Amino acid sequence: MKKIIFAFVALASLLFASCSKSSQVVKMGTNAAFPPFEYTEGTEVVGFDVTVSNLIARDYGKQLQVVDMSFDGLIAALQAGSIDFIAAGMTATEERRKNVDFSEPYYSSKQTIIVRSDTNTVSSVKDLAGKSIGVQSGTTGEIYATEEVEKASVKSFKTGIDASLALKNGAIDSIILDELPAKEIVRRNPELKIIDDDFFTDEYAIAVKKGNTELLNSINKTIQTIKENGTYQKLIDAFMPVDGEITILSADEL
Ligand code: ARG
């Protein structure tokens, strides 16, 4: 009898632990190949979006769990409920708004062009006509290259970093990618350079499942608070230095 009671107690506490655990966690989906917003440092996913997400989770009263996956699978994962929000330098586009709800924008970016340093035939996006362009699958860069650049042959990669390898070995002529990840790639690869041309602006926002207003309101509140209390600026200064290395600033240090 004792054994049965013991087994029952053990089972009950196990069930309780797993239930309470799942309800204490909020899951953030991202694609950690997009520095300084999200990237890996050893086995850990770090970056501006990760720290902001930790602050979001803290305000929401839950533990953050980061789920790293391919960028083009994030919206489906959100709709399926396997993640609670997306923080991935994701541009709030009208097309995506059909499937998700977006927070207030938290960062303004633009698309940039990367070419090899010895390329001198490209000075604006128009010069990419007829050339091969590498992009990250499922991104605004991919849509722009496909829809706006004449006769381009668009090659989609899993990450912008994969595209940069193809550019270095001559498999493609150029890349269209968001500004800061592009700058970070070029900083690490002196044989590549950025072409300055303003052709597309991105407003990054956090996505939640359509109708999840409780979480969305909480996220918007966190964004507003960090903008007002100086934390946002601290994060910009650490993760987006004008020149040089990124400093990882974690939520615990704030
Ligand atoms: N801003 C672009 C978009 O929304 C690219 C984002 C890519 N993000 C990432 N974590 N890989 O399409």
Image: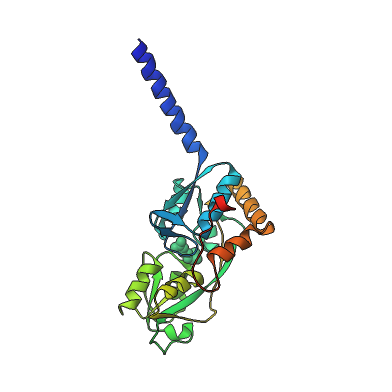
The total of numbered circles placed on residues is 0
Question: Residue 120: x and y, percent?
Answer: 41, 89
Q: Specify how the rendered protein is coloured.
A: rainbow
Residue at x 34%, y 14% (from the top left corner): 3
Q: Residue furthest bottom?
A: 121
Question: Can residue 212 be seen?
Answer: no
Residue at x 42%, y 72% (from the top left corner): 185
Quarter of the picture holding the N terminus = top left
Question: Residue 157: x and y, percent?
Answer: 36, 67
Question: Residue 84: x and y, percent?
Answer: 50, 47
Decide: is 57 above or below 118: above
Q: Is residue 48 left or right of residue 176?
A: right
Q: Residue furthest top?
A: 1
Q: Is residue 158 left or right of residue 196?
A: left
Q: Which is nearer the eye, 222 or 102?
A: 222
Residue at x 41%, y 56% (from the top left corner): 73
